[in-house]
Amino acid sequence: MKQQEYKDKKIAVIGIGGVGGYTAAMLAVEYPNVTAAARGRRGEAIRRAGIRVHSDRHGELSVMPHEVVSSADQM
C-alpha cells in the first residue's frame, strides 16, 4: 500500500514521555488522526500547547495531536 492510503488511519500513542512524546509528534507531522494518552499536568500542557520536540535531526517541532485523552479507556 502507498503511504497516502494510510492517511485516514487512527493512531494512538499511550504514555507521552520522552519516547512516546517523540513518537506521537513524528506521527502527527504526517498523519492527521493521532491521539495521545497523557494524564495530569502533562496532558493539560499538551492540550494547551501541543507536543514540542527539540531534535538535532528534525529541528524544533510543535505539533497538536488530533485528541489528547487521560486514559486508554477514552479512546
Image (spheres, rainbow, N blue to C red):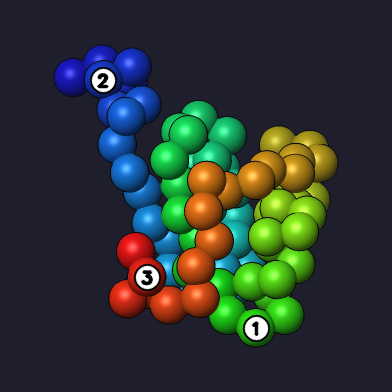
Q: Which residue is mark 3?
A: 74
Residue name at image x 71 percent, y 53 percent: 50
Going from the N terminus, do you reach mark 3 or mark 1 first? 1
Q: Nearer the viewer, mark 1 or mark 2?
A: 1
- Residue 57 placed where, x, y %? 71, 39
Q: Mark 3 Cα within 10 Å, few/some/many (few <14, many 20+)?
A: few
Checking the image for residue 40, the label placed there is 1
As measured in the structure, the alpha-carbon distance from the residue carrying label 3 to the one carrying label 1 is 15 Å
Query: Residue 74 location, x and y as percent?
Result: 37, 70
Mark 2 residue element? helix
Q: Amino acid at mark 3?
A: Gln
Residue 55 appears in the figure: no
Q: Which mark is residue 5?
A: 2
User: Hey, which residue is sitting farthest front in the picture?
Assistant: 74
Between the residue at mark 1 and the residue at mark 2, the CA separation in whole angstroms equals 35 Å
**Residue at position x 52%, y 46% in the image:** 66
